[in-house]
Image (spheres, grey):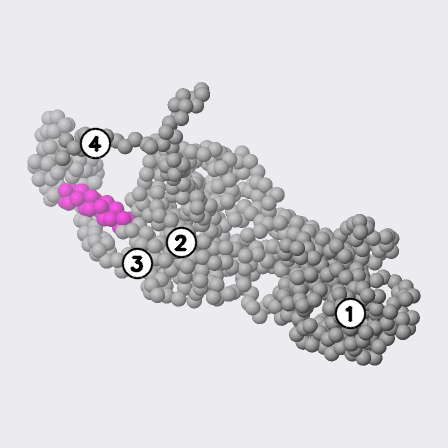
Amino acid sequence: MARKKQSEKPKKSTIPNAYIAGAGIVEEEKITETLEKNYMPYAMSVIISRALPEIDGFKPSHRKLLYTMYKMNLLTGGLTKSANVVGQTMRLNPHGDGAIYETMVRLARGNEALLHPYVQSKGNFGKTYSRDMTYAASRYTEVKLEPICQELFRDIDKDTVDFVPNYDNTMKEPSLFPTTFPAILVNANVGIAVSMASNVCPFNLAEVCETAIAVIKNPKHDILSTLKGPDFPGGGFLYYDETELQKIYDTGRGSVCVRSKWTYNKADNCLEVTEIPYSTTIEAIIDKIVDCIKQGKLREISYVRDETDIDGLKIAIDLKRGSDPDKVMQKLFRMTPLQDSYSCNFNILVGESPRVMGVCEILEEWTAFRMECVRRRLVFDLKKKNEKLHLLLGLEKILLDIDKAIHIVRETEEEANVIPNLMIGFGIDEIQAEYVAEIKLRHLNREYILKCTQETDQLKADIAQLKETIEDPKKIKKLIISELKETAKQYGQPRKTLFYYASDVEEEQEEEEIPDYPVHLFLSESGYFKKILPASLRMNSEQKLKEADRIICHTEKTNRIELLFFTNQQLIYKTRASEFGECKASALGDYVPAKLGFGEGELVVQMVATADYSGDLLFIFANGKAARVPLRSYQTKTNRKKLQKAYSAKSPLVQVQQLPADDAPCPIFVRTDGNRAVLFDASLIAAKTTRDTQGVQVITLKAKQLVCEAQILTEEDAQLRKKYRVKTIPAAGSIVRDLPSSGQMVLPS
């Protein structure tokens, strides 16, 4: 077998080599192999060592910065220039000063990005709620650690966590912080890795500690009963959706809705926004409001400005006279980031493995991590006490016969032999002998002996208690619970983000969002639509059209009117006049098939405008039939944009006309290509509820003849054409000779 293995040769790649001028022979390689060798290590590095937070609540960049500040005695000392900290952090973090300083800015109190900041700041650190308010350079600002950082570094020097070499192996740094509270849930943490991301929302510290205690006591604890919901540093109001919150707590994924806090200044007739959602900025809100004003969606607002100053955030929105501030604010919530959602994705590294976890699972993992930290601390204390006890036991033997010890020391000729002689004389080890030899002569009195004896007894009791605690997980959990209570009491603060409920949301009709004003609506035969203001039409009424095109529909309505576009494929496309932009008569307008997404070969036949779907529609077909359908047959409860079977497909449609809602006489004139015509009243045709009804015959056609024209006449025009009037249908009609002009004629499409 050994010979066979030695004779085996490594497999050669089946991919041929290529010769490239100037480069020589280049071996080709599969892209999958290249990605595996080159991209995968990078991806894993980003996931594990950069973008995702770990169970202690920090990314490596945060941890390196805070630990550097801790080693610089900035937890108890005074403020120092930020540039000093940035420079020292470079010993742990192999990045430029800009990246390190930006990390510090996000952790600083002045930036207001964290619910519980870790860095106390002096100077301009910008604001997380402002896109344009940039922070000052590191040479101008000063920092130190906040008092809450004591809970991050507590007992870090007692071997509670592992220490690893830095990037150049010149010093050690902690792999995790032994945090005494679940910092991972207290402060927001956002990171984008390769093929995955993390977005942890912040929660109230007191609520998190209370929930952690409850989970330690009962793993099946109802999280929602103690952890009310996210608490953002920017405040605002959180929509309390119990179902969505439970989903986030169970799965670690979901989203919450946050709206701004506002007041109405009656004296200045303006809305004042003082707290905004954590996920947006002042500039994004103002830009969106201005955009909506330009589009005519917020006509109640006259001006908007940023009044943020040293006292805090403020956006002032001036209202026009007579505007209802509550209704305007509801529109702003729907149309701008003044109400925004925050997506949650609790993707956290546990043992260098990314996991999306719910709140209960996160707390269980943190508890396991914290239990290991406390156990290691107890083991460290036990080791120190054992070492101290070992020394005192050696001293105890000496104190039993001090004269003998003095004699040994006095009779020893060389100093190097003092320790060995003490070891031989009293039966102690070298460490004990070293300790005894260093005792000062002044300490060899009765008081000192009694103290050593008492300390020995206390050490024995402490060691027994430590051993008992280390071996009992329940006692370790009690220690963790006491630390959580202490942290919550000392650093807990009232919620900044309050709640609003479904009953607080005012339901407004959609029409409230649409400004209402008079408009002229035009539709050309080739499908171009224009919405023109009356003032603009008075200035220039000459319509610009394409060659051989003409206006087939003109109506005066309002901007809120609903439009029904009938196509040559028996379909209806429903929209509103407000969906079209205003234009001038000198413009071609909007091309309806493109605007509404018509299918291939689909063209506009006619347009009908309605506000309440009252009245009837009259369809005239080329085969001489007419169908009357109530307009309410096209009304839908849902917001459907497209309806099929709008009318009969048995014969080509010549015209569709909207009949008045009242019972007033409505003369209909129909003419054939055989030069015959009839004039009858629309009341002769009964309405059918079926949209694609074939209708009834209104004119008798001769062979190969078709209807070519149909229109509603005014009473004056009907009087001029009275010789074509019939009292019953169908009718053969009269021959058209001298037809009086009645304005625009509608030809078949």
Amino acid type indicated by mark 4: Glu
Amino acid type indicated by mark 3: Lys
Residue bearing the label numbered 4 = 8
Most extreme residue toward the top is: 22
Residue bearing the label numbered 2 = 356
Magenta range is: 376-396
Name the residue located 73 percent from the left edge and 75 percent from the top edge.
696
Disc number for residue 203 = none
Q: How many marks?
A: 4
Q: CA distance from mark 1 to mark 3?
A: 100 Å
Q: CA distance from mark 2 to mark 4?
A: 46 Å
Q: Is residue 641 left or right of residue 516?
A: left
Q: Is residue 486 left or right of residue 655?
A: left
**Mark toward the start of the polypeptide (2 vs 3):** 2
Closest to the observer, 22 or 743: 743
Q: Is residue 290 left or right of residue 460?
A: right
**Mark toward the start of the polypeptide (2 vs 4):** 4
Kind of element beneath mark 2: strand
**Mark toward the start of the polypeptide (4 vs 1):** 4
Kind of element beneath mark 3: helix
Main SS, magenta region, reads: helix
Kind of element beneath mark 1: loop
**Mark toward the start of the polypeptide (1 vs 3):** 3
Camera-near label (2 vs 1) is 1
Disc number for residue 477 = 3
Residue bearing the label numbered 1 = 702
